[in-house]
Image: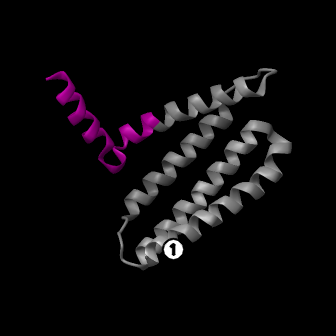
Amino acid sequence: EKNTNRQFQITAIMAVVNVIGNLILIPMSSLVGAAQSTVAAFSVGAILSWWYGRSSNIYQVTKEEILNAILIFFIFILTIQLVPVSYEDDSIEFALRLLSGLCSFTVVVIVINHSETRSRLIEKLRKIIK
């Protein structure tokens, strides 16, 4: 029950971060601001969950896994920011940026084999082919 209560607290903190971020970023950046706020909220949640899990000995995360996650995050953000799209409709621009970010995210996760993703994917593909 202690773990459930802690996760509820972390989720509540994430919600507060997201609402405050939305209030600040949506007027400035529209849909992209909303997405940035959500990424910030989930990042806070991931960091708090990681910290709580380590301090409670629930799970141990290696430095390599943390560095891989940070690398993936920055490549995703850079891709979203660097994609040269310009549409009058913010929703189309947002969708194109998000799609490009998700594509780069997927490629990086597979290339660096984060959480053994590539190995699991190959195993599932072999099962489908058989």
Residue 27 location (% of width, % of height): 86, 44
Residue at 36%, 73% in the rendered image = 58
Camera-nearest residue between 28 and 63 = 28
Q: Quadrant of residue 55?
A: bottom left
Amino acid type, mark 1: Asn
Tally of marks: 1
Residue 129 location (% of width, % of height): 18, 22
Q: Which residue is mark 1?
A: 5
Q: Quadrant of residue 112?
A: top left
Secondary structure character of the magenta stretch overall: helix
Camera-nearest residue between 91 and 98 = 91
Q: Residue furthest right?
A: 27
Specify whether residue 120 is painted magenta: yes
Name the image quarter holding the C terminus.
top left
Q: Is residue 6 left or right of residue 93?
A: left
Specify whether residue 81 is painted magenta: no
* Segment colored magenta: 106-130
Dot 1: element: helix
Q: Is residue 52 above or below residue 19?
A: below
Q: Is residue 88 left or right of residue 40?
A: right
Name the image quarter holding the N terminus.
bottom left
Residue at 44%, 39% in the rendered image = 108
